[in-house]
Amino acid sequence: MLTLFECKIRYQKPDEHSGKEKRVTDTYLFDALTYTEAEERIYKEMPQYISGEFMVASIRKAKYAEILPSDDGDRWYKVKISFVMIDEASGKEKRISQLILVLASDVKDAVDKAIQGMGGEGDDSFEVNTVAETPIMDFFPYFDKDKAPEDKEISRRPATEADADLPKLQDKE
Protein backbone atom coordinates (compact mmCIF):
# COMPACT_ATOMS: atom_id res chain seq x y z
CA MET A 1 0.00 0.00 0.00
CA LEU A 2 1.20 3.49 -0.79
CA THR A 3 2.10 5.91 1.98
CA LEU A 4 1.05 9.27 0.62
CA PHE A 5 1.53 12.76 2.04
CA GLU A 6 -0.33 15.93 1.06
CA CYS A 7 2.16 18.76 1.33
CA LYS A 8 1.18 22.42 1.26
CA ILE A 9 3.81 24.81 -0.05
CA ARG A 10 3.52 28.58 0.51
CA TYR A 11 5.43 30.97 -1.76
CA GLN A 12 5.25 34.32 -3.58
CA LYS A 13 3.98 34.27 -7.15
CA PRO A 14 3.41 37.15 -9.59
CA ASP A 15 -0.27 37.87 -10.22
CA GLU A 16 -1.15 37.25 -13.88
CA HIS A 17 -3.30 40.40 -14.16
CA SER A 18 -1.59 43.03 -12.03
CA GLY A 19 1.97 41.66 -12.00
CA LYS A 20 2.23 42.22 -8.23
CA GLU A 21 3.57 39.50 -5.98
CA LYS A 22 0.91 37.54 -4.12
CA ARG A 23 1.21 34.75 -1.57
CA VAL A 24 -0.18 31.41 -2.74
CA THR A 25 -0.42 27.99 -1.15
CA ASP A 26 -0.32 24.96 -3.44
CA THR A 27 -0.85 21.32 -2.53
CA TYR A 28 1.33 18.52 -3.84
CA LEU A 29 1.10 14.78 -3.22
CA PHE A 30 4.27 12.81 -2.42
CA ASP A 31 4.73 9.06 -2.13
CA ALA A 32 7.20 8.68 0.74
CA LEU A 33 7.91 6.37 3.66
CA THR A 34 7.90 9.02 6.40
CA TYR A 35 7.05 12.67 7.03
CA THR A 36 10.78 13.42 7.03
CA GLU A 37 11.31 11.79 3.65
CA ALA A 38 8.30 13.69 2.25
CA GLU A 39 9.76 16.98 3.47
CA GLU A 40 13.18 16.10 2.05
CA ARG A 41 11.63 15.33 -1.34
CA ILE A 42 9.73 18.64 -1.27
CA TYR A 43 13.00 20.53 -0.98
CA LYS A 44 14.52 18.47 -3.83
CA GLU A 45 11.56 18.70 -6.25
CA MET A 46 10.05 22.15 -5.75
CA PRO A 47 12.96 24.34 -6.97
CA GLN A 48 12.26 22.93 -10.47
CA TYR A 49 8.71 24.34 -10.35
CA ILE A 50 8.92 27.37 -8.06
CA SER A 51 11.33 30.27 -8.44
CA GLY A 52 12.43 31.93 -5.24
CA GLU A 53 11.89 30.94 -1.65
CA PHE A 54 9.09 28.73 -0.40
CA MET A 55 7.94 27.37 2.92
CA VAL A 56 6.42 24.01 3.81
CA ALA A 57 3.13 25.04 5.43
CA SER A 58 1.90 21.54 6.33
CA ILE A 59 2.37 17.85 5.71
CA ARG A 60 -0.36 15.33 6.41
CA LYS A 61 -1.03 11.73 5.49
CA ALA A 62 -3.46 11.14 2.64
CA LYS A 63 -5.72 8.11 2.57
CA TYR A 64 -5.95 7.21 -1.11
CA ALA A 65 -6.17 3.51 -1.86
CA GLU A 66 -5.13 3.95 -5.48
CA ILE A 67 -3.87 6.62 -7.87
CA LEU A 68 -4.92 6.62 -11.51
CA PRO A 69 -2.77 9.06 -13.52
CA SER A 70 -3.40 9.74 -17.20
CA ASP A 71 -1.79 11.67 -20.02
CA ASP A 72 -4.85 13.70 -20.98
CA GLY A 73 -5.99 14.97 -17.57
CA ASP A 74 -5.22 18.34 -16.03
CA ARG A 75 -6.97 18.19 -12.61
CA TRP A 76 -6.91 15.67 -9.77
CA TYR A 77 -10.27 14.31 -8.60
CA LYS A 78 -11.03 12.40 -5.42
CA VAL A 79 -13.43 9.56 -6.23
CA LYS A 80 -15.09 7.68 -3.38
CA ILE A 81 -16.15 4.15 -4.27
CA SER A 82 -17.93 1.54 -2.16
CA PHE A 83 -17.64 -2.23 -2.31
CA VAL A 84 -20.38 -4.51 -1.01
CA MET A 85 -18.86 -7.50 0.76
CA ILE A 86 -20.64 -10.42 2.41
CA ASP A 87 -19.40 -11.26 5.91
CA GLU A 88 -18.96 -15.04 5.81
CA ALA A 89 -19.43 -15.48 9.56
CA SER A 90 -22.69 -13.54 9.94
CA GLY A 91 -23.93 -13.60 6.34
CA LYS A 92 -24.61 -9.83 6.41
CA GLU A 93 -23.66 -7.31 3.75
CA LYS A 94 -20.84 -4.98 4.67
CA ARG A 95 -20.06 -1.77 2.75
CA ILE A 96 -16.40 -0.77 2.49
CA SER A 97 -15.43 2.65 1.08
CA GLN A 98 -12.15 3.72 -0.48
CA LEU A 99 -10.80 6.90 -2.00
CA ILE A 100 -9.16 6.90 -5.42
CA LEU A 101 -7.23 9.84 -6.85
CA VAL A 102 -7.83 10.26 -10.60
CA LEU A 103 -6.17 12.67 -13.04
CA ALA A 104 -8.89 13.72 -15.48
CA SER A 105 -10.15 16.65 -17.53
CA ASP A 106 -13.61 16.88 -15.88
CA VAL A 107 -15.95 15.09 -13.46
CA LYS A 108 -17.42 12.75 -16.08
CA ASP A 109 -13.94 11.81 -17.27
CA ALA A 110 -12.90 11.14 -13.64
CA VAL A 111 -15.87 8.79 -13.13
CA ASP A 112 -15.14 6.98 -16.40
CA LYS A 113 -11.45 6.54 -15.55
CA ALA A 114 -12.29 5.34 -12.02
CA ILE A 115 -14.72 2.74 -13.39
CA GLN A 116 -12.20 1.63 -16.01
CA GLY A 117 -9.41 1.47 -13.40
CA MET A 118 -11.56 -0.67 -11.09
CA GLY A 119 -12.55 -3.25 -13.67
CA GLY A 120 -14.88 -1.71 -16.20
CA GLU A 121 -18.57 -1.05 -16.82
CA GLY A 122 -19.83 -4.59 -16.32
CA ASP A 123 -18.42 -4.92 -12.79
CA ASP A 124 -21.23 -4.56 -10.26
CA SER A 125 -19.04 -5.22 -7.20
CA PHE A 126 -18.57 -1.49 -6.53
CA GLU A 127 -20.35 1.83 -7.00
CA VAL A 128 -19.10 5.39 -7.35
CA ASN A 129 -20.45 7.50 -4.46
CA THR A 130 -18.85 10.94 -4.79
CA VAL A 131 -16.46 12.83 -7.03
CA ALA A 132 -14.78 16.07 -6.00
CA GLU A 133 -11.99 18.16 -7.45
CA THR A 134 -8.94 18.38 -5.17
CA PRO A 135 -6.46 21.24 -4.75
CA ILE A 136 -3.59 18.87 -5.61
CA MET A 137 -1.34 20.39 -8.26
CA ASP A 138 0.90 17.37 -8.94
CA PHE A 139 1.81 13.89 -7.72
CA PHE A 140 5.40 12.78 -7.12
CA PRO A 141 5.61 8.97 -7.00
CA TYR A 142 8.43 7.09 -5.36
CA PHE A 143 10.75 5.75 -8.06
CA ASP A 144 13.34 3.08 -7.56
CA LYS A 145 16.64 4.87 -8.16
CA ASP A 146 18.33 1.69 -9.45
CA LYS A 147 16.01 1.24 -12.45
CA ALA A 148 16.52 2.84 -15.83
CA PRO A 149 14.29 5.91 -16.46
CA GLU A 150 12.10 4.03 -18.96
CA ASP A 151 11.62 1.15 -16.47
CA LYS A 152 10.65 3.30 -13.49
CA GLU A 153 7.77 1.96 -11.46
CA ILE A 154 6.28 2.98 -8.15
CA SER A 155 8.18 0.83 -5.71
CA ARG A 156 9.74 0.72 -2.27
CA ARG A 157 13.31 0.25 -1.14
CA PRO A 158 13.90 -2.97 0.77
CA ALA A 159 14.24 -2.53 4.53
CA THR A 160 17.84 -3.80 4.41
CA GLU A 161 18.79 -1.04 1.97
CA ALA A 162 17.05 1.60 4.08
CA ASP A 163 18.84 0.34 7.21
CA ALA A 164 22.18 0.63 5.42
CA ASP A 165 21.53 4.38 4.93
CA LEU A 166 21.13 4.95 8.68
CA PRO A 167 24.23 6.11 10.58
CA LYS A 168 25.71 3.44 12.80
CA LEU A 169 25.27 4.11 16.51
CA GLN A 170 28.49 3.94 18.45
CA ASP A 171 28.86 3.00 22.10
CA LYS A 172 29.61 6.02 24.23
CA GLU A 173 31.73 4.33 26.88
Image (cartoon, rainbow, N blue to C red):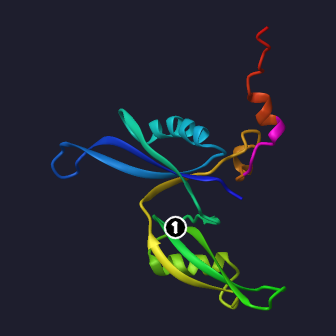
Q: Residue at x 51, y 67 (%)?
A: 72
Q: Is residue 7 left or right of residue 68?
A: left
User: Which residue is at the front of the view, 77 or 18?
Assistant: 77
Q: Which residue is drawn at 60% across and 54% down?
A: 4
**Image coordinates for residue 101, horizontal then vertical, percent:** 56, 66
Q: In this view, does 88 lie to the left or right of 138?
A: right
The residue segment tinted magenta is: 155-160
The outermost residue toward the left is 18
Q: Is residue 162 magenta?
A: no
Answer above or below: position of 29 versus 129: above
Residue highlighted by disc 1: 72
Residue 80 in which image quadrant? bottom right
Q: How many labels does the image show?
A: 1
Amino acid type at mark 1: Asp
**Image coordinates for residue 138, horizontal then vertical, percent:** 49, 54
**Image coordinates for residue 143, horizontal then vertical, percent:** 68, 46
Q: What element carries label 1?
A: loop
Answer above or below: position of 98 versus 153: below
The quarter in which the N terminus is drawn is: bottom right
Secondary structure mostly seen in magenta is: loop
Q: Which residue is drawn at 74% across and 91% down?
A: 92
Q: Residue at x 83, y 86 (%)?
A: 88
